[in-house]
Image (cartoon, helix red, strand yellow):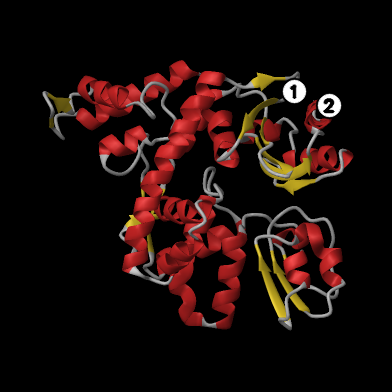
Amino acid sequence: METIKGSSAECIIITDLGASYIKELEELNKDVIVLDHHTLRDDSDKVVYVNPHIDGNDGACGATIAFLLSIEMEEKNWDLVQIALAGIVGDKQHLHGLSGCNQYILREGIKRGYISTSEGSIIPTGQIVNSLYTSIDPYIRGVSGNFEGVKKILEEAGILSEGKFTFGNGGWRRLSSLIAIKLIKQGVTLDTMTEITRRKYTLKDWAMDAETLANILDACGRQSFQWIGIGVCLGSKEALEKAKLLKEEYGKAIVNAAVELDKNKLRELENIQYFDSTGFTGILCGVAMRFIGNPNKPVIGIDCSDEKIKLSGRATIALTKKGVNLAAALQQSAQSVGGNGGGHDIASGGSIPNGSKEDFLRETDKIIGQQLKSAM
């Protein structure tokens, strides 16, 4: 907010955030446009506020709303639907099928020839050794982050023999089955197994699927190379090659952090589970919720490495159906200790003052318990 207040611009467009600051934005002596999709707190007559929740709709992410503005400004911007779809899948809004605005732009993107679809696979995409080693979706215990484990599973599948690869004779089918067996032994739920094999969306102008592009852009942003990510979106081949290298380095760092979390395990309270983190907190929350922790309790990741404690929370569709709403829970519990929180029912975040961690956890555990009881 301080950066926005200090800006000399007469008009400011805010994308993928702003829902929590509508009242503060109304006080600015300039034109403000907010393109957001997060849970509503306030509406506005002064700020130009675009949020599908205002009309009781969901099925949109920040990239969706920004893209819709772009085609409203210029019809020829429909080619940007490919980048918008990367934003949608990067926000995990495709896991149980697209809806609302997301479904509309996918349908139009297919019709206009920018997007094609194909069946998914439990085997991670990419060069097989590296993709298995860096895999966190799925995170395969004993394989992810373990080159010996990768070698062993490829040998068991008959894909690798005496240092040589053989792609045929049912090897991919056997590899798929071996991965599934390992995930079942980990305690991964059927819902998550189904999510892993989700439909893929191939982008015509990018020669890759939307999830790969999303991961490339995410790697740029997470490592403070946003300018490379912008170059990728603008079509720079040089930026794309640099971004692919960043993705590879980032993937190794994340899988190493996931292996460490798997070793240390999560700590459980009555209704939630949590872990301490010094980076990759949101991503590790998702990995922990689906592949490492107790699938019956939402996960809270806590990063105390900065001036304020940063929070990330993840649930599952199954938990939200039981009444869990992380956006409401983290908003209330963070505010109770002098912080802020919000987001979505299934994924949320926030920040709280240093020294308030234990009080925050107790309050969050209590609120989640109340949510579960109220829904019974």
Left or right, 321 with respect to 236, comes to right
Q: Position of residue 151 (x, y in %)?
A: 25, 25
The label number, if any, that marks residue 235 in the structure image: none
The answer to whether the residues at label 2 and label 1 have Cβ atoms under 8 Å apart is yes
Binning the other alpha carbons within 10 Å of mark 2 as few (below 14), some (14 to 19) or many (20 upward) gives some
Identify the mark nearer the N-term, 2 or 1.
1
Binning the other alpha carbons within 10 Å of mark 1 as few (below 14), some (14 to 19) or many (20 upward) gives some
Q: Position of residue 323 (x, y in %)?
A: 75, 33
Question: Circle 1 sits in a helix, a strand or a loop, which is it?
Answer: loop
Left or right, 17 with respect to 102, comes to right
Q: Which of the two residues, 79 or 132, is positioned nearer the viewer here?
A: 132
Q: Quadrant of residue 168?
A: top left
Q: From the image, which quarter does the N terminus lie in?
A: bottom right
Residue drawn where x is 46% and y is 26% of the image: 259
Left or right, 207 with respect to 184, comes to left
Q: Is residue 334 above or below residue 52?
A: above
Q: Amino acid type of disc 2? A: Lys
Q: Amino acid type of disc 1? A: Asn
Q: Which of the two residues, 207 or 71, is positioned nearer the viewer here?
A: 207
Residue 49 visible at all = no
Residue indicated by mark 1: 271
Q: Is residue 226 above or below residue 284?
A: below
Question: Circle 2 sits in a helix, a strand or a loop, which is it?
Answer: helix
Q: Position of residue 298 (x, y in %)?
A: 67, 30
Residue 257 visible at all = yes
Residue indicated by mark 2: 366
Q: Quadrant of residue 348?
A: top right
Instruction: Using the numbered discs, state the Cα–Cα distance from disc 2 to disc 1 in whole angstroms.
Output: 8 Å
Residue drawn where x is 34% and y is 52% of the image: 245
Residue drawn where x is 68% and y is 58% of the image: 37
Residue drawn where x is 78% and y is 31% of the image: 357
Q: Position of residue 211 (x, y in %)?
A: 43, 50
